[in-house]
Image: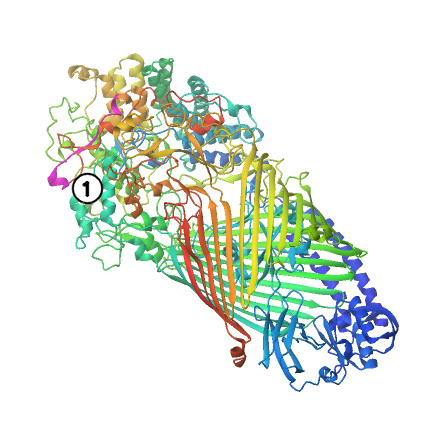
Amino acid sequence: MSKFLRFKMKVFAILLMIVSTGFHPLMANIPTNPNEIFWQMDLESTKVSFKVVDARIIDVLKKIEAKTDFHMAYVTNELPSDRNVSKDYNKESLLKVLEELSRDYKLKFTQVNNTIHVGIQDLPASENIEIQDEMNRPVSGRVLDETGEPLPGVNILVKGTNLVAISDLDGKFQFSSVADDAVLIFSFIGFESKEVSILNKETIDVVLGEDMADLEEIVVVGFGEQKKANLTGSVATVDSKALENRPVTNVMNALQGTAPGLTVTRSSGQPGQEGYNLNIRGITSVNGNNQPLVIVDGVEGDLNLLNPNDIESISVLKDAAAASIFGAKAADGVILVTTKRGIAGKTEVTYSGMYTFNKPYSQPEMLSSYEQGLMQNEARVNRGGNPVWRDEQLAWMQDDNINYEINANNPDRYNYYYNLNKKDLIMRDLTYSQNHNLAVKGGNSNTQYLISLGYYDQNGVFKFGPDGTKRYNARINLNTKFSDVFSLDSRVSYSSDETMAPSRNVGGDYGMIYEIYQSRAIYPVYLPETDDTQYAQGTPSYFASLKDGGYYQRNRGDFNGIFTLKAAVAKGLSLKLVYNPRFRNYKEEQFNRTVPFYDRSGSPSNYLNQVNAIRKERTNIFNNNIQFYADYDWKLGEDHQFHVLGGYQFQSYRYDEISATARSLMSNDAPSLNFGSDPSVPPLVSDNIQTNAYLSYFGRINYSYKNKYLFEANLRNDISSKLAPGYRSKTFPSFSAGWVLTGEDWFTQALPFFDQFKLRGSWGRLGNANVLGNYDYISLLSRGPNYYFNNVSNISLYQSNLASFEKSWETIQSTNFGIDLGFLDYRLTASFDYFVRQNQDMLVTVTLPSTLGVNPSQTNSAKLETKGWEVIVGWRDQIGEFKYNVGFNLSDNRNKVLEYAGRSVYGQGVNSIIEGLPINTIFAYEADGYFQSESEVENWAFQDSRTGAGDIKYIDQNGDGEINGGLFRPEDHGDLINVGNTSPRYLYGANLNFQYKGFDFSAFFQGVGERKMLIFTNAAIPLMQSWRMPWKIQQDYWTPENPDAKFPRLYEGASHNARPSTHWVQDAAYLRLKNLQVGYTFHQGILDKVGVSSARVYFSGQDLWEVTKMWFNYYDPENPNNVSFNYPFFRSYAVGVNITL
Amino acid sequence: MKKLKIMRKLKNITIKLSVVFLLIAVASCQDELDLTPETQISDANFWNSTSDLEKAANYLYSYLPGIYDANDNMGVFSYSNNGANSISDGTRITPATDGSWNSNYRLIRACNNILEKSEGITGDEATINKYLAEARFFRAWAYADLVKKFGGVPLITKTLDSSSEELFAPRSDRDAVLDLIYDDLDFAAGNLPSPGAQSAAEYGRITATAALAFKSRVALFEGTRAKFHNYGSPNTHLQLAIDAAEQVISSGEHQLFTYADDPALSYRKQFHDIGDGKSNPEPIMVRLYAQNASNNLAAHRMTESRLNQGYMVPTRQLADLYLYTDGLPMSQSSLAKPQENSLTQFEDRDPRIAMTIFSKNEFYSTGTYYQPGFNFSPSGYKFCKYFDPTHFSPPDTWVDYQIIRYAEVLLNYIEAKFELNGSVDDADLDMTINLIRSRVGMPSLTNEFVVANSLDMQTEIRRERSVELANEGFNYWDLIRWKTAEDIMPQTIYGAKFFLEEYGETANKLDENNFVIVQGESDRFFDPAKDYLWPLPLQEIGLNPALEQNPNW
């Protein structure tokens, strides 16, 4: 702990040092000439040096424009043309220069952002222009971007004249006298230019669309930004618009299908516990979770807790060249998220709200108790047993008036004959969620801020009980410029969420949903004749769990501060010191409340949680991250551009958990650790501390020749505490290059229809440290179960895993080739990437004979190769006021285990790793329908002593007269065949957007072209276990009259039909309408009257429709392989509004 | 202007200073990389004292079987309400992995680890040897389970690592495994305290008599198996069984349990709370559960969730085995009469039948009395052994599981003696079977009685064992070693006789005598060429090519 304190103090001292000295310029004199010059800080801090003798004022302005980043806006013939200016400035502030020019030449300067508008003092600009037309009139208006934000600094030219106006901070402009039928030309960098006729209009509101294909588009990359045109690595960007107004629980859900090569999956619909999983380009390693590194504003972050509305942009770094600057944690690629920041201008308040109706789907259809009973009888008799139910009992199940009888064997107990649809009893058809966001932003040129607040609330599927989640987000992003050298970018966010769930497992086999779906319909909830006051003996506890069984509560809080102190030390050279303390706390509480179940005697016969217990867990996670790096840009002549980046980074992580459990509480309604009933049994307390740290050095060099030939190299060295001393340091290089053919004259002459033709290639290596435990190299002992000698608890210890000193992280080598294309004025764009990625020393737990007697350690002894490609095509155009774009992306990857210590066992079902085959390959028997007669069984290869007509017929591949897996080895795997693997193939996404006047429409489809999965046979095969009740779909079972049924004959405990076979392999390919949005943006004229600057209302639907190849359709194709019982997914229907004041 | 210059200077200083600071920070960050686990013990810091050794030995106890293992579902005395056991009806297929294979080798490693790591420990030698003896007992325990199921298995006597050649060793032969078992058990018997010398706080730890009793079990198994399956040297093993059992008997440490309040109920009470703890001299090796509701950290639900819900229910095969009070079996006793109701079969019988199988109107749980029926019982019977009505509701039960009890040792002794010599004398019967019989008030078994009634001594010794140890997990293994499984296992499993007025309507199949057919002959299989040994798990054979599968699997 003290180490961390020391470390924090060190960082703080450095920050204080730099900030305190850097602050002084702020206290310098503020110039006073407010009438003539609209003072801006930037002018003061911009230094210019030049010398002019007898120059025209216009030449001086041009000079300033060349020397600074400012754009000078003037009308040439407004300015005096006298050659009367002589000046000599040496590193003088631009403010001073303009002050002098203003005083000496009667000029008026107006700075709007980076544009300095030049006019003649005291006379309105337009009055100096002589236009005699009597039809002249004034015109004014406003320029907005597509989101309704005012656009300042837009150049507005009256066509055919020299008349120019610049829009102000509110986007407003004015001409006092122009021709009645004049045409205005609006232009602004980064936006499409637009011509608008003013005929019959006195005010004009113009919306400029962003020019997406603009080569100036900036892409966020590791430790900086790059022009898209200059990218050489494989980087996909996600438009923040794709994430907006979606009724989704979090960012990850919205990312699905938006970028080629990025896969998003989820495992459950349970609010707050959806189990989202991100993946870039398939499997990197059999270890770990293959999740990309998530970087938010330059430091590691968490997408679970991020407010989707705060996101400005997302970049997905896919190849080693793009990701390697992030080192050993970035082996699975990187997702770079940048949050929105304030912009100088009028304070703007935006509210967006959404109300969503969620409808659960992918649920099984239930059978009545009578239908269950019939199937139970048939299955039991087929097994050679006696029927479970007598006819009389079956009749009672159908009879609403007879629901129970007293158990003759035990008069305290009932036998039940209810018919209860448990799904309808406790699951809703419709749940709701809501989402509110408020953002305020603004600032001046020194300081800009954005403050945002978010609230999200979702109800779960259960009609009562703890089930739902809430999230609160708050963020302040503040940029301050202290001086012409120092500026500070602070991004402080706090998010918290709260998830409530039942105290016991909801999903999974034998969880609550299992009870709802598969327990017998004959059971009531309450004991007969008790007026629903006593839970009935012998019934499953789902109802009692929800209503009275306590709760599970999880609260997470995440405080994240990112403070970037930037020093522009010299031209082209800037230093950045980033300090990021991140503090997360988890608070978990689980209260297992005792609920009695009664029998007829009136005394409790059994209990849910017979011993009640409260568990409280508190976890604090501290992340410290300090980065220091320097950027240097320079040019050699006009053609050679260089960029160098170098720095270091220190990251530390400390997870500190304390958990306490008290049992046998003295009150069933006072869940506190203080109330354990036996004072001699104190609460059970445990702690768990996990730590790790990384120290890294990194560097990058970019070189570009005429923006035609591009080259980039990265080098990163990582040292990690996770490895044994002496094995800790490793260096990872990467290189990439690009050739812009459209920069070559011969190319553009030969193929003029290309606007862009760029070839890219990259090679690099990365470490994969995600797969290591924190102390793998140390041989640790684990606590075994306690044992009770003489009824006193005794501790036991043992070694559960072998340690490995030589263990190192995996090395991921990846090679990437890409082409970027643009045609038809960039209306049509396309990119293609091909990659090969190798995990060269993948950690594997080599399966060893069990005679080892302990879990083997992992060794870096396997090799995995993944190959794949991605293509993305977009088309955007405009027909009159009808603007539209369509986009399509498709990606695929395949993997193969190249080496796996030479040992391979072919198991039935899913094999995680087999040499020479893809990860998660399924070996199964080939099913050939059902046996239709006993004689067919006799004449077929021997399968099982139970096999009879109606059972699945497996093909005897090797003709040895027996159905088995042989030696389960490559040279003899008997009748098992390779039926594919569980990895999804051909992932695609397609979007269609159009806008017409105020209306907008977008549809987003997403899907998977091929995926194999096995279904959970215990649930899929009717009465595979006698206590699992069948579903409606399972009524379609084999009988002589139904020879082509979906399911084999009913047979209790039919494990012979449950062998992994092609019969149970599902093709989980699907196409889904992921999102559909229809919106209307109100006309500006109406809004102005109520003081609103923009307003949009919309409908947004999520997961509305899908088509899948799975025939067992009670599971969603997104469910993981062999899923058992899942909290259902939802279809979401949302209405929302966005208002900007 | 002057001010600006000063500021510029200040800025330069700032930059230089910050670079210096950063370099310091970088240099000192190296230390931050030395992180060690703060909440776990490493192997290197352990193994110093006898108390460390004790904690390591405690872990071995987690491998003891649980009370739910007390059932005969694999054999023919018991059947589950959840359907047939696939070993019992012969429908099991070769598994990919086998829990007992894996967990036995885990236990073996834990034992070997203790034996090796103990070398550096200083402390009282007797104490150290006690824990080493426990380790060797458990190693023998694991190998005995393996050899019983699979035959000869790879013999691992040291801790292996990932590169050890022994991982790919072939199976050792049976005798090599058994030699190790005997050797380990002898060491254990020599270094463990006798129950009388064991402190109360250590109750539940293995004792010297437990090692000997277990040795008699293993040696009897192997001796009879070798004899009836016709291999090896049966007599050597039988003699070992006799010797070991005799040592237990002569130690005087154990006696059959007597329920002082009502000695006639001793057999029943033996398996209730009252039978728990050091005061009961009969249990030799126990699986402990905790004590009561306030000390309930280890509890089971044998009464409610297992026995009441019919996870194991008796069959007619068991019910018909009990003698009549004249000491004669059903086929010969004049007391045997046609069943007229569900209670007839309990009349004039060995009292253990009613202390093993529920009879009508027996106290069941608070306020209720047992009524025969097919609720949670496919046979119409239910077990009352280990059924403690006071733990019916609430269902948590803390009754310990008697893994080895004195009665078994007596039965091991007499059977081994008979199988070795082909006969036993009355003195041997008196010190064994007749002690057991007299506890329940049954007449003695003598050579004269056997001859007079044309009985078969072997059958009677086996009957006594089957009846006394019913549903304690012996039935299947007895059938295997006697080589009678091939005759008995494929037979129809019968349940109670059906009486409409008592049971009400039934959908169950009945035979011509109105006996319930629980599972018909056509659904039961036993292949003598295959089923006397269990299949090795496929994954092990795949991983270790030297490992040979058992015949016909």
Element carrying mark 1: loop
The x, y position of residue A804, in whole percent, is: 59, 35
Quadrant for the C terminus of chain A in the image:
bottom right
Q: Nearer the viewer, residue A1082 or B108?
A: A1082
Question: Is residue A118 toward the left or the right of residue A1063 in the image?
Answer: right
Q: Is residue B222 above or below residue A812?
A: above
The residue that label 1 is drawn on is B370
Residue at the far right: name it. Answer: A53
The x, y position of residue B136, in whole percent, is: 47, 26
Q: Would residue B105 be visible to someone looking at this image?
A: yes
Q: Nearer the viewer, residue A179 or B151?
A: A179
Q: Nearer the viewer, residue A991 or A980?
A: A991
> How many numbered dots are placed on residues in this image?
1
Mark 1 residue type: Tyr
Chain designation of label 1: B
Question: Is residue A254 toward the left or the right of residue A36 in the image?
Answer: left
Q: Quadrant of residue B176?
A: top left
Q: Is residue A497 magenta?
A: no
Q: Is residue A208 above or below residue A467?
A: below
Residue at the far bottom: name it. Answer: A134
Magenta region, residue range: B487-505
The x, y position of residue A777, in whole percent, is: 60, 38
Question: Is residue A249 toward the left or the right of residue A604 in the image?
Answer: right
Q: Would residue B410 be visible to someone looking at this image?
A: no
Colour approach in the figure: rainbow
Question: Is residue B87 toward the left or the right of residue A133 in the image?
Answer: left
Q: Is residue B499 magenta?
A: yes
Q: Is residue B65 above or below residue B419?
A: below
Q: Residues within 10 Å of mark 1 (few under 14, many from 20)?
A: some
Q: Quadrant of residue B360?
A: top left
The x, y position of residue A961, in whole percent, is: 36, 23
